[in-house]
Image (spheres, rainbow, N blue to C red):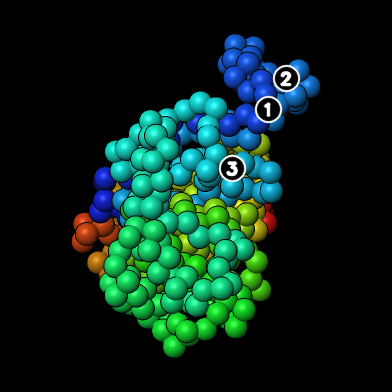
């Protein structure tokens, strides 16, 4: 089930504008040709022996938001995330994190910025085998020169948060894959970063463990409220975890929106094919399928006093249960105010539309 968007925060923590990454010795020449002549990726490769990894990507991420970047292998999603902390240098574009122009930072400033502002969780865990679990988690604090007693206390607290405090003296090879990834997450969070970058963190795990870690991460995020960029090739995972989702193809972002936005209004056939197998039952909300009250009244007359009432965030699954028990129109409320009406045919049509695209 997709999370509700964090609408309480309007503060932008991360903003990228017109970011390009072209690999090759003639990257700048290739970019000029793309802008001036409209060259395609294949033409860029043929003419300049250059590969377009990220193409003119722009978006903003709000404080506390989990922003999923989703795409198939080769779509550019992992290349993109490595620009936020300049593990890769963009060919062009602007990257602002917490008001800091990341591209303007010198070497020493960049290292300090990474240490204090950004945490990263990798697919391959990246734990140091010669360090204990506790020492692995404390490592970012050690880099920041936090005294030993304090960093060990903070690391122990973070291990308790991910329910691994009993394993603090073990080594990585003694832990399961799921446990190792929880240590990786604890390490990333130990230094209290402003932004968390997660590059397919659960994809190497078996399905059952992956789902458990997704649930744990959702609960942890609700408490810690870290601004998170979450990279995944799994749309089901993006739908479960993300407040919003950006879908990438060939280095470009083709659509950004909530899971509901993307499922109900895919931007093109590519996105429509992607979301075809996603169940609408837990994603689609009452506000997306309601009709205006005026329209209902003009066609059917006054709303019955005994009509069931639901919040605008009620899921399609909840609406179906109501429609089974009661043929009356369903009144949709927003903070107690009547804002729309849903009829049984509206619900059936939404279910049929979903079935026809799957």
Question: In this image, 14 relative to 277: left or right?
Answer: left
Q: Residue at x 33, y 60 (%)?
A: 145
Residue carrying label 2: 48
Q: Residue at x 46, y 34 (%)?
A: 58
Question: In this image, 45 relative to 195: left or right?
Answer: right
On the question of residue 6 being in view, the answer is yes
Question: In this image, 198 relative to 191: left or right?
Answer: right
Q: Residues within 10 Å of mark 1 (few under 14, many from 20)?
A: some
Element class at badge 1:
loop
Residue 96 versus residue 218: which sits nearer the camera?
Answer: 96
Which picture quadrant has residue 173?
Answer: bottom right
Residue carrying label 1: 24
Residue 106, relative to residue 241: is it above or below? above
Residue 134 versus residue 312: which sits nearer the camera?
Answer: 134
Q: Residues within 10 Å of mark 3 (few under 14, many from 20)?
A: some
On the question of residue 324 being in view, the answer is no
Q: Residue at x 29, y 38 (%)?
A: 99
Which picture quadrant has residue 149?
Answer: bottom left
Q: Nearer the viewer, mark 3 or mark 1?
A: 1
Mark 2 and mark 1 lie on one chain; the one further toward the N terminus is 1
Tell me whether the residue at label 2 lies in contact with that at label 1, contact meaning CB atoms closer than 8 angstroms. yes
Mark number for residue 79?
3
Q: Nearer the viewer, mark 2 or mark 1?
A: 1
Tell me whether the residue at label 3 lies in contact with that at label 2, contact meaning CB atoms closer than 8 angstroms. no
């Amino acid at each position: 089930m997709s999370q509700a968007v964090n609408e309480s925060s309007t503060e932008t923590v991360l903003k990228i504008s017109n970011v390009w990454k072209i690999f090759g010795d003639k990257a700048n020449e290739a970019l000029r040709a793309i802008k001036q002549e409209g060259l395609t990726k294949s033409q860029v490769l043929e003419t300049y022996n250059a590969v377009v990894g990220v193409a003119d990507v722009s978006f903003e991420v709000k404080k506390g938001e989990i922003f999923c970047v989703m795409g198939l292998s080769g779509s550019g999603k992992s290349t993109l995330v490595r620009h936020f902390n300049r593990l890769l240098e963009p060919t062009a574009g602007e990257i602002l994190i917490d008001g800091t122009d990341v591209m303007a930072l010198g070497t020493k400033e960049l290292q300090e910025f990474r240490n204090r502002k950004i945490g990263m969780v990798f697919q391959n865990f990246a734990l140091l085998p010669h360090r204990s679990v506790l020492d692995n988690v404390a490592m970012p604090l050690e880099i920041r020169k936090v005294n030993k007693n304090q960093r060990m206390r903070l690391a122990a607290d973070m291990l308790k948060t991910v329910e691994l405090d009993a394993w603090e003296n073990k080594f990585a090879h003694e832990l399961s894959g799921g446990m190792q990834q929880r240590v990786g997450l604890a390490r990333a969070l130990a230094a209290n970063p402003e932004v968390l970058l997660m590059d397919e963190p659960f994809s190497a795990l078996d399905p059952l463990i992956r789902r458990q870690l997704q649930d744990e991460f959702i609960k942890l995020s609700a408490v810690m409220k870290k601004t998170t960029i979450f990279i995944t090739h799994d749309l089901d995972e993006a739908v479960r975890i993300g407040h919003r989702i950006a879908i990438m193809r060939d280095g470009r972002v083709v659509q950004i929106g909530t899971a509901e936005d993307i499922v109900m209004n895919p931007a093109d056939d590519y996105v429509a094919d992607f979301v075809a197998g996603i169940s609408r039952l837990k994603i689609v909300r009452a506000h997306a399928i309601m009709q205006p009250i005026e329209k209902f009244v003009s066609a059917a007359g006054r709303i019955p006093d005994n009509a069931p009432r639901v919040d605008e965030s009620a899921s399609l699954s909840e609406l179906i249960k109501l429609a089974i028990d009661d043929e009356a129109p369903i009144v949709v409320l927003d903070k107690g105010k009547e804002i729309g009406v849903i009829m049984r045919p509206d619900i059936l049509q939404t279910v049929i539309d979903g079935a026809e695209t799957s």
